[in-house]
Amino acid sequence: MNILDRYKKPTPKFFRILRTLGVGLATAGGTILAAPVSIPAWLISIATYVVVAGTVVTAVSQAAVDDDNEEQASKVNDDGN
């Protein structure tokens, strides 16, 4: 299975929730980084890490697939139905 096939398959509920949280983290961190006011260096550093963490969580969660559907489909195909 290549990466494009993996992204087209359904995502389990747990990983959909993680994906949503990751998008929220990345958005919050990006908002802090793009703020037009003077922000302390430590907050910018934390916001950068939050953006990276949110992006990674989102990408990994999107790549998770529900194998149960695939196994059921292969059993149906093996039975000839």
Image (cartoon, rainbow, N blue to C red):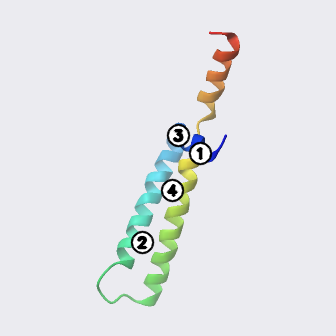
- Mark 4 sits on what residue? 58
Q: Residue at x 47, y 86 (%)?
A: 42
Instruction: Return the x and y of residue 62 as percentages of the image width and height.
Output: 53, 49
Mark 2 or mark 4, which has the lower sequence index?
2
Mark 4 or mark 1, which has the lower sequence index?
4
- Mark 1 sits on what residue? 64
Measure the alpha-carbon separation of dots 3 and 2.
28 Å
Q: As displayed, is residue 17 above or below residue 35? A: above
Q: Residues within 10 Å of mark 4 (few under 14, many from 20)?
A: many
The amino acid pointed to by label 1 is Ala
Q: Which of the two marks, 4 or 3, is nearer to us in this view? A: 3
Q: Which of the two marks, 3 or 2, is nearer to us in this view? A: 3
Q: Which mark is residue 22?
A: none
Verify CB contact (< 8 Å) between mark 3 and mark 1: no
Occupied quadrant, residue 4: top right
Measure the alpha-carbon separation of dots 1 and 2.
24 Å
- Mark 3 sits on what residue? 8
- Mark 2 sits on what residue? 29
Front-lying residue, 74 or 29: 74
The amino acid pointed to by label 4 is Thr
